[in-house]
Image: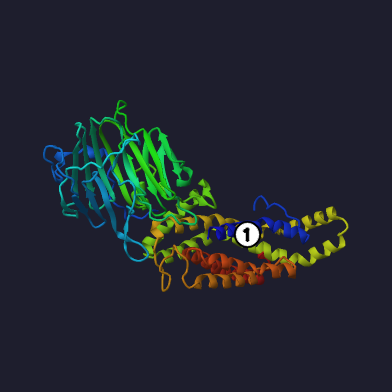
Amino acid sequence: MQGRLVVFFILSFAIIAAYPFILEKMGVQVMAPPADSTPSTNRPAAPLTPADTQIDEQAGLERHSLPPLKLPAAVSEREYIVESDLYRVVLSNIGGTIKTWELKKVTDNEGKRIHLIPKGGQTAPLSLVHTDSKIKREAPVYQMASGTLRLNEERPEGAVEMAYIGPHGETVRKRLRFRHDQYAAHLTVYVQGNDAPYNLSLGSNFGILEWNYAFGGQVGAISRVNDEIINDYVSDIEQTEVREGQVTWVALQDKYFISALIPALASTPSEKGIKKIHLYKEGDRAVRADVSLPQGSSSFTLYAGPKEYDRLSAFKNYLEETIDFGWFLWDSWLPVRLIAKPLFYVLRFLHGLTNNYGWAIILLTVLIKIVFYPATRASMVSMKALAALQPKVAEIRERLAHNKEKMNAELMNLYKASSANPLGGCLPMLLQMPVFIALFNILYTTVDLRQAPFILWIYDLSSKDPYYVLPVIMGISMILQQWMTPSTMDPTQAKIMLVLPVVYTFFFISFPSGLVLYWLVNNILGIAQQYWINRQIAVSPQVA
């Protein structure tokens, strides 16, 4: 599909770029145009921030206190379950880690719940990893209560503690505080007396479910260090990578899901904060992200869930930039993001009115058509004028075929006198392409459109039409639109251009059905506009 999309864009731009050349071959002199020519209100609660982890026993949270620390007598796994309407998290005393992070309201294509921690990972989330890779140690057994903590509106928050004392007196405490309405948990880690520095691991592939995306949506590790967002693909990591500086967050992500570790910002200059990230390549499709822990207490927010824009942007640390609005062909481009984000806001607003993203796309297409109507009308009028000039153009070409310079001069005067612009015909497509690319990113990379149904057989606007109905109708609409558009080409060139609807239909077969819906509605509105303008010109030729 990636190759097909690339060819589509190249073909589209080639048609636009070659337009003046085709006109020149027809004897048309290309001239410059004349000089006179809100977000959804249904927002989640403000996210938990690392600073809130300073609230301790006085917070009145339901939690299980630990007895005085002692060396474990035997190794036996105990589990503690934290459950809300959004998630089900299973903690293990073996290593003091997260064993399961299950999303209750998000399912895969088979209707099964999403599990953000893949099976078979080398390192579990929240593991403490010795920085000396030569030292191999068994996972420590933490003291932790077993049982289940159920959170809801009546019991909105709860905390779980795990603690470990090593054979040489080293002490580790971990405390997680959950809210029933957030995918974020507060994490406090206290380490003291370790014989060497430790890293706190985000885990292996935590939050990465799918590696096989053909394009759009970056998969792997991503971090913000020294106010710069850095993408680290597994293929780019030799074995290990180290990022040093002021760490805002580090995350593992795929197109729709993410796990992120957000350190608390240092409140005083004397506090060290988190200054180093370690990235490890654990296989062709396995990556791990760790942060270096100082001695004493460190506070974090752990987010693990879907990449919902409002939830990520509420952290106010650019975590929402992990949603790749700017993807274009092979990289993320700022101009595309600048168009995509406003479109996304408008689309969500329209969804709030219709409660259906399919109708929202249709309304958005109507709004775009209204905004671009002046340019579209000028283009159609120009094409009509050019078509009317073709007999005179043919006469000038035949009469002055031996004198190219004089022929071009006369053609230029002819176009100026008639106010016809040969480049006007490609203006609507030039204006549409950035919108098309931006809308493609919205449909393909935002979790909001994931599994969003429209009507009848369209059950997922982010995936292709399973029966190819929309692409076929779109191809027919392109043929009709082409037939209604005044032609400035000779019959042979016009026949060649008739192949384009077939080519475009082939490309659109695998595109997200929401994108095909946009292009289809755009064509239908274009046909209506062409019919209306043709009638105006027929009734009043002065309109041209």
Whether residue 270 is situated above or below residue 21 in the rendered picture: above
Q: Position of residue 19 (x, y in %)?
A: 69, 58
Taking the spot 75% from the left edge, 68% from the top edge, the residue there is 490
Q: Position of residue 17 (x, y in %)?
A: 67, 55
Asked which quadrant contains residue 20, the reply is bottom right
Taking the spot 86% from the left edge, 60% from the top edge, the residue there is 401
The answer to whether 180 appears left or right of 4 in the picture is left
The answer to whether 201 appears left or right of 454 in the picture is left
Whether residue 244 is situated above or below residue 446 in the rendered picture: above
Taking the spot 46% from the left edge, 64% from the top edge, the residue there is 514
Q: Position of residue 276 (x, y in %)?
A: 37, 34
Residue tagged by mark 1? 11
**Category of crowding for the residue at label 1, using alpha-carbon neighbours closer than 10 angstroms: few (below 14), some (14–19), many (at least 20):** some
Q: Position of residue 295 (x, y in %)?
A: 26, 30
Residue most extreme to the top: 270
Residue most extreme to the left: 67
Q: Nearer the viewer, residue 231 or 443?
A: 231
Q: Nearer the viewer, residue 471 or 148?
A: 148
Taking the spot 20% from the left edge, 31% from the top edge, the residue there is 168
Q: Nearer the viewer, residue 87 or 516?
A: 87
Asked whether residue 226 is in view, the answer is: no
> Which image quadrant: the C terminus?
bottom right
Q: Secondary structure at mark 1?
A: helix
The answer to whether 277 appears left or right of 24 in the picture is left
Asked which quadrant contains residue 202, the reply is top left
The kind of residue on which mark 1 rests is Leu
Asked which quadrant contains residue 357, the reply is bottom left
Asked whether residue 256 is in view, the answer is: yes
